[in-house]
Image: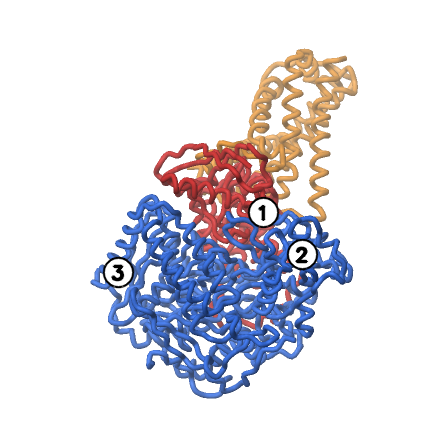
Chain colours: A blue, B red, C orange
């Protein structure tokens, strides 16, 4: 258990980070030049970290899966980024942002980390504005804030509906500046295939060049993984097509512990699934819930008619509609946290009140807001979202109710890290969505961007330096060491094996099957029987995959099928661990809802006595069950309460 | 719906490519264009053929990865969207759709419909940033920025770097892309200190990479999925002219 | 070889400035040409032609104009060659993006106008300058009768047709060139750009009609 030392600094909550920085070890400028850092992933966290390391004077090698760092999936975040600036003077503070985040995460995150996140949130806004990020402004020329995701204060900074894009472009520009100066060497279109450990420390990576297929070796004194989340284990999610869990999974298999793998966020406002050829789901910004009212028909016969297409939603009178969120949660109404809203939608649809051709959709209605505020106001606020909806669904949301349904959006789980964002493998750090993060069992809206940039700009530059301080006498590693030889040989063997199966099923067909298993049994609501079944089904799927998958072509070419196959191999194994974690955690908390553990009203029921811990899974070999380690969560500064949005 | 696809196939940058015709059937009107290509690829894989390579990622019109020159237009027939956002209801049953890669000297073909757009990154690396370090910056509200300027900067910053402007331009000019970035920073006080240097460096890099010249045809604006205005090109010309006149010799 | 020397935008700016400058030539030239329609004796026209041929300022200016044409043509060619080089492999399906129509054909209209200019130069300028013209005497004095040369040439239907077509193409060239010059100079403003575009269109129509009127009136009278 000694391995799970969170290394939380001493002192009062508000002084921990200051104390850490005051006492950490530094590397002098002439030594920085001699230290190499590998950053895998160049989204918000990775680009911010790589740029900052470059500015400090380290030798940085950055790797991205795309043709350009600007395409990382951070770009798709719409709503905004939180910070405790309290510009609107509505009572916000660092403590309140910290408290809201801990509470929103259902008390399954580490106090010290979350406090630090809230603390540096203000620096992030300053940094981004200085970089030229065009945040929305008021007529007086100062920054505008909005309320988001059910927060009681307006603390969300935004750039139209493209906040993620603008922040990523900010980090990308900082990274580009360093690439231009030569402090960062950028490698685009690379997939991580293996992590290289030398004498117990992370010292390098094996990469596949996605254009030539060349297998490359890269060595460094420290490795940072900022490779995002693994929501694509569900096949259909709001994640981009290339988003994958392979880097974190390789780290896990090399000994890094995996934290809270089952904690998945299901976002309530996505466009419903419409066909089996569908490749991904589209998120509609949560801000829609500020003015939209969510409902389903009150009577099952109306729902039935709507599903058959013999009735239109606009024909239903107010009395025949059930605004179920307003009914169940009068205090928060349509603005309850994501997990609550998602589950409530599923509950109604499972009970037979769902709409759309599949019955897996609920309505989001703007008729009242349009009447109250006028169409032009709604258009100004949500015009681009309405247009996007119309392009996809071919229905005009100004005239009829939109249809929405929850979809997988974010994974709170990830590599277990200590206060320094270091995994259980020394010298291996994880940042952004790739770590098990500060969001506990549920992430609040507009917090993902905050965490990615916090990790990248303001945490890693300190903590990685602290780690490297005693590495200054270690010379740069050569890539002909036996550890590199072996790692490369192993990856080549895997690729050969995949290419030689030559079965009859496409990679996507397995991915789709895995997604269905995950969605049905490890999705919004889970239970013991289902999870056990899922584990068996996934194991069977894995066997079938290795027997019957068809991966065409060869390694030495652009081969998207091979890329997908390598990722699906890892998704299958990761899916099993998620199911295991969900099975083990016999409580409901945040995004993890076990049907056996709920209040009589159907709300999540936590078990603080037995489950106030982070589950950290250790790989014990391909044929052995993983071992569970527990990092107890100690709440010294806040009182743990039942979440209540009624 | 049933369609004939006339697709450019090219095994690698070194090979000579050619058009190959494919038939796809039973495509839903509600499928997206890329999902239609997924279906084709799945069939090709099962048949043991090489699937068609194309760039794509977010599939919601923001990452800028998808491209495709469809029936003579970048990102296909609809306005203000990317290829991934286009649905098959924009096409007629039985239609032949011609799909080509972006064509420009600085965007060499990698395979089939994939092209190398790192030229854009090189332009950004030449000066498309504000030279601030992490930390040590003033409070975000220290400078008030007129809302109008901030909005114009945001309009320009909406560029997703897809390269449709280059693909559409008869001269393969990158002026809309470069001017969007130059404009964003030129409009904001944070970007002013190095505005003169920035515009000259970025334009020099753009020229060096072999993009064509702007002849103000405005095809770029018509095809830009984010509808970025050519007013940005004028702003860049203005910035460039003043920089040339005002800036000291280096 | 044609590379870099000057930045693309520098070339465009010079191109615009020279282009706008050359329109002054079009205006002056047209005004003088129109004089031929005002009296059968061509007195006004011949007097003006004499003034233009002898005034020292005009004579100097003429060389500046000449250089302007050369610069405009050479830069136009350089830019066009670079543009062709920027897309070595073209599209199979012709581009159908919406764009300003005449902007697509600047090199084509420009080239034809250039050929016209050469011919025109040979027909009038060279003859007037170096050839021997008949003389005609008015009450104000004796002048070379350049006007009769014009009248004679415009008796040839083929020449008139060529002249009219060339001027039409010049009009198209101007229609895009005029407003485009402002864009290249960075003078784009949401209040003034629409005005500039209208002025540009009116200007090109006026120039076209003005020039075309002369051969048509002479031919048909």
Q: Dot 1 corresponds to which residue?
A: B81
Q: Quarter holding the N terminus of chain B?
A: top right
Count of numbered circles in the view: 3
Q: Are marks 1 and 2 on the same chain?
A: no
The 10 Å Cα crowd at callout 2, few under 14, some 14 to 19, many 20 or more, is many
**Callout 1: few (<14), some (14-19), or many (20+) C-alpha neighbours within 10 Å?**
many
Image location of residue A232, percent across then percent down: 46, 58
Marks 1/2: CA distance? 34 Å
User: Looking at this view, is A443 or A405 the one in front?
Assistant: A405
Q: Residue at x 37, y 40 (%)?
A: B50
Depicted A133 relative to depicted A510: above or below: below
Question: In the rendered view, does C216 fall on the left or right side of B39?
Answer: right
Q: Which of A335 and C120 lies nearest the eye of the viewer? A: A335
In the rendered image of this protein, does residue C73 appear above or below residue A380?
above
Q: Which residue is mark 2?
A: A303
**Could you confirm whether marks 1 and 3 are on the same chain?**
no
Q: Estimate the x, y position of residue B149 in percent, counting from the top left.
A: 64, 59
Q: CA distance from mark 1 to mark 3?
A: 43 Å
Q: On the image, numbered disc 3 is attached to which residue?
A: A487
Answer with left or right where residue B5 lies relative to residue A388: left
| Chain assignment, label 2 | A
Image mark 3: chain: A
Mark 2 or 3: the one toward you: 2
Give the left or right position of residue A261, taking residue A645 as reference: left
SS for tag 3? helix
The residue sitting at 73% across, 30% down in the picture is C206
């Amino acid at each position: 258990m000694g391995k799970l030392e969170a290394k939380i600094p001493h002192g009062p909550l508000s002084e921990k980070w200051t104390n850490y920085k005051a006492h950490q070890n530094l590397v002098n400028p002439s030594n920085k030049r001699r230290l190499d850092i590998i950053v895998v992933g160049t989204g918000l966290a990775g680009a911010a970290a790589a740029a900052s390391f470059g500015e400090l004077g380290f030798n940085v090698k950055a790797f991205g899966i795309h043709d350009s760092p600007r395409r990382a999936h951070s770009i798709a975040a719409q709503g905004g980024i939180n910070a405790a600036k309290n510009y609107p003077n509505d009572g916000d503070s660092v403590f309140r942002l910290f408290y809201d985040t801990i509470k929103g995460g259902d008390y399954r995150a580490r106090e010290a980390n979350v406090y630090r996140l809230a603390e540096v949130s203000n620096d992030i806004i300053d940094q981004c504005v200085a970089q030229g990020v065009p945040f929305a402004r008021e007529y007086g020329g100062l920054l505008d804030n909005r309320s988001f995701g059910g927060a009681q204060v307006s603390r969300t900074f935004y750039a139209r509906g493209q906040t993620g894009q603008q922040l990523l472009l900010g980090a990308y520009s900082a990274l580009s500046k360093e690439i231009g100066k030569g402090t960062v060497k950028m490698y685009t279109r690379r997939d991580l295939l293996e992590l290289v450990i030398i004498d117990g420390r992370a010292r390098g990576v094996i990469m596949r060049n996605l254009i030539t297929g060349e297998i490359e070796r890269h060595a460094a004194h420290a490795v940072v993984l900022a490779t995002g989340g693994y929501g694509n284990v569900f096949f259909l999610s709001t994640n981009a097509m290339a988003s994958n869990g392979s880097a974190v999974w390789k780290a896990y298999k090399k000994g890094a512990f995996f934290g809270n793998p089952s904690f998945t966020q299901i976002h309530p406002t996505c466009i419903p699934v419409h066909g089996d050829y569908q490749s991904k789901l589209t998120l509609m910004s949560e801000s829609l819930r500020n003015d939209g009212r969510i409902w389903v028909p009150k009577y099952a016969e109306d729902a039935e008619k709507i599903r058959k297409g013999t009735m239109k939603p606009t024909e239903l009178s107010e009395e025949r509609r059930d605004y179920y969120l307003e009914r169940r949660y009068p205090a928060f109404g349509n603005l309850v946290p994501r997990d609550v809203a998602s589950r409530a939608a599923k509950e109604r649809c499972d009970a037979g009140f769902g709409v759309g051709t599949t019955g897996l959709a609920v309505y989001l209605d703007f008729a009242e807001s349009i009447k109250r505020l006028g169409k032009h106001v709604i258009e100004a606020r949500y015009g681009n979202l309405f247009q996007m909806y119309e392009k996809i669904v071919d229905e005009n949301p100004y005239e009829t109710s939109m249809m929405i349904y929850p979809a997988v959006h974010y994974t709170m789980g990830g590599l277990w890290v200590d206060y320094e964002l270091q995994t259980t493998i020394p010298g291996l750090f994880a940042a952004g969505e790739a770590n098990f993060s500060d969001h506990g069992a549920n992430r609040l809206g507009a917090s993902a961007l905050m965490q990615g940039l916090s990790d990248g700009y303001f945490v890693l530059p300190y903590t990685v330096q602290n780690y490297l301080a005693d590495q200054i006498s270690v010379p740069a590693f050569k890539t002909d060491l036996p550890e590199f030889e072996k790692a490369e040989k192993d990856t080549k063997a895997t690729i050969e094996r995949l290419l030689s199966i030559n079965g009859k099923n496409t990679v996507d067909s397995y991915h789709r099957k895995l997604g269905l298993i995950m969605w049905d049994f490890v999705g919004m609501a889970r239970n013991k029987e289902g999870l056990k079944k899922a584990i068996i089904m996934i194991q069977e799927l894995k066997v079938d995959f290795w027997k019957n998958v068809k991966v065409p072509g060869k390694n030495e070419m652009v081969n998207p099928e091979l890329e997908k196959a390598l990722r699906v191999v890892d998704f299958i194994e990761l899916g099993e661990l998620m199911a295991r974690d969900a099975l083990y955690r016999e409580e409901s908390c945040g995004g993890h809802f076990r049907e056996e553990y709920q209040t009589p009203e159907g709300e999540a029921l936590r078990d603080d006595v037995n489950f106030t811990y982070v589950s950290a899974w250790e790989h014990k070999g391909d044929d052995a069950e993983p071992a569970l380690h527990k990092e107890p969560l100690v709440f010294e500064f806040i009182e743990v309460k039942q979440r209540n949005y009624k | 719906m049933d369609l004939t696809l006339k697709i450019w196939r090219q095994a690698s940058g070194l090979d000579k490519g050619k058009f190959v015709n494919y038939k796809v059937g039973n495509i839903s009107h509600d499928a997206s264009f890329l999902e239609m290509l997924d279906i084709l690829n799945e069939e090709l894989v099962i048949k043991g053929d090489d699937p068609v390579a194309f760039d794509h990622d977010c599939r919601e019109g923001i990452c800028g990865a998808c491209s495709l020159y469809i029936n003579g237009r970048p990102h296909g027939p609809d306005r203000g969207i990317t290829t991934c956002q286009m649905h098959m209801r924009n096409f007629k049953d039985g239609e032949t759709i011609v799909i080509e890669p972006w064509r420009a000297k600085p965007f060499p073909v990698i395979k089939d419909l994939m092209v190398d757009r790192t030229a854009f990154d090189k332009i950004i690396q030449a000066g498309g940033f504000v030279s601030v370090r992490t930390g040590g910056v003033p409070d975000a509200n220290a400078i008030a920025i007129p809302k109008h300027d901030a909005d114009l900067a945001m309009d320009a910053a909406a560029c997703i770097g897809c390269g449709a402007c280059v693909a559409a331009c008869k001269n393969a000019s990158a002026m809309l892309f470069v001017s969007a970035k130059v404009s964003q920073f030129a409009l904001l006080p944070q970007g002013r200190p190095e505005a003169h240097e920035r515009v000259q460096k970025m334009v020099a890099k753009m020229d060096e990479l072999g993009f064509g010249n702007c002849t103000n045809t405005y095809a770029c604006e018509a095809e830009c999925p984010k509808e970025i205005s050519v007013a940005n090109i004028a702003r860049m010309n203005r910035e460039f002219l003043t920089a040339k006149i005002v800036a000291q010799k280096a | 070889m044609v590379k870099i020397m000057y930045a693309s935008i520098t070339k465009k700016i010079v191109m615009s400035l020279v282009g706008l400058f050359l329109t002054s030539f079009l205006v002056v030239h047209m005004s003088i040409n129109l004089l031929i329609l005002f009296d059968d004796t061509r007195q006004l026209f011949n007097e003006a032609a004499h003034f233009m041929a002898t005034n020292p300022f005009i004579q100097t200016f003429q060389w500046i104009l000449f250089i302007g044409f050369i610069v405009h043509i050479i830069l136009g060619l350089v830019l066009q060659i670079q543009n062709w080089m920027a897309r070595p492999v073209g599209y199979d399906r012709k581009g159908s993006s919406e764009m300003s129509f005449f902007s697509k054909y600047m090199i084509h209209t420009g080239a034809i106008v250039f050929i016209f200019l050469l011919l025109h130069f040979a027909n009038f300028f060279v003859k007037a300058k170096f050839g021997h013209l008949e003389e005609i005497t008015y009450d104000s004095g004796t002048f070379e009768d350049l006007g009769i040369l014009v009248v004679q040439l415009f008796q040839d239907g083929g020449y008139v047709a060529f002249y009219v077509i060339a001027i039409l193409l010049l009009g198209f060239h101007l229609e895009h060139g005029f407003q485009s010059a402002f864009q290249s100079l960075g003078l784009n403003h949401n209040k003034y750009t629409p005005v500039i575009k209208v002025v540009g269109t009116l200007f090109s129509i006026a120039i076209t009609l003005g020039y075309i009127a002369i051969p048509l009136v002479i031919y048909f009278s």
